[in-house]
Image: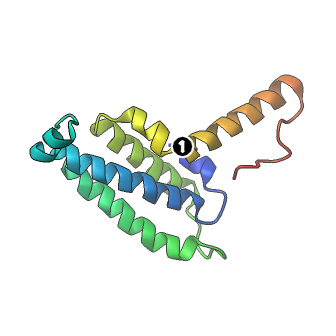
């Protein structure tokens, strides 16, 4: 959840990645919630995973509406409340689909951002020097 908050530094970056992740989970939850498709694609069938498609689609729609005003030059910013809520929603969808490890792959930008911040803070605390000049990835 906090990785989305860390990514929300550049215009459209966090919400663009969120739309991509939500689209991937919408496809996956639809496939996992439909017995015929799950059997054909050889993915595990979860009876109520199809309802998560609606949640992911709502996140995509809201994200596209927000992206219009968040692209350069940004007129509206998400803030901590929005980014943490979106990160939490993505995490809950990943857990409900039972595809938590896929989130590391699909949400790779969030992972890279979080790792860069963790490395930067650890380096500064231990050595007093920074690895990066600033936060180069966001």
Structure colour scheme: rainbow
Quadrant of the rendered structure where residue 23 is?
A: bottom left
Q: Is residue 48 visible?
A: no
What residue sits right under mark 1 in the picture? Answer: 108
Q: Answer left or right for 46 relative to 102.
A: left
Q: Answer left or right for 39 relative to 76.
A: left
Along the line of sight, which residue is nearer the eye, 25 or 52?
Answer: 25
Residue under the image location 30 percent in, 53 percent down: 26
Q: Secondary structure at mark 1?
A: helix
**Percent position of residue 34, x then y:** 13, 47
Residue under the image location 51 percent in, 61 percent down: 16
How many numbered dots are placed on residues in this image? 1
**Percent position of residue 107, x then y:** 49, 45
Q: Is residue 93 visible?
A: yes
Along the line of sight, which residue is nearer the eye, 1 or 38?
Answer: 38
**Dot 1: within a 10 Å radius of its alpha carbon, few (fewer than 14), some, or many (20 or more) residues?**
some
């Amino acid at each position: 959840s906090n990785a989305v908050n860390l990514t929300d530094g550049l215009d459209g970056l966090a919400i663009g990645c969120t739309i991509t992740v939500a689209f991937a989970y919408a496809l996956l939850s639809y496939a996992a919630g439909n017995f015929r498709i799950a059997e054909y694609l050889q993915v595990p069938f979860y009876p109520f995973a199809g309802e998560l498609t609606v949640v992911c689609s709502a996140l995509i729609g809201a994200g596209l509406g927000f992206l219009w005003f968040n692209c350069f030059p940004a007129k509206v910013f998400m803030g901590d409340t929005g980014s943490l809520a979106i990160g939490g929603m993505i995490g809950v969808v990943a857990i409900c689909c039972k595809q938590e490890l896929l989130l590391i792959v699909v949400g790779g930008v969030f992972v890279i951002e979080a790792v860069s911040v963790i490395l930067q803070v650890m380096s500064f605390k231990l050595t007093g020097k920074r690895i990066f000049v600033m936060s180069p990835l966001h």
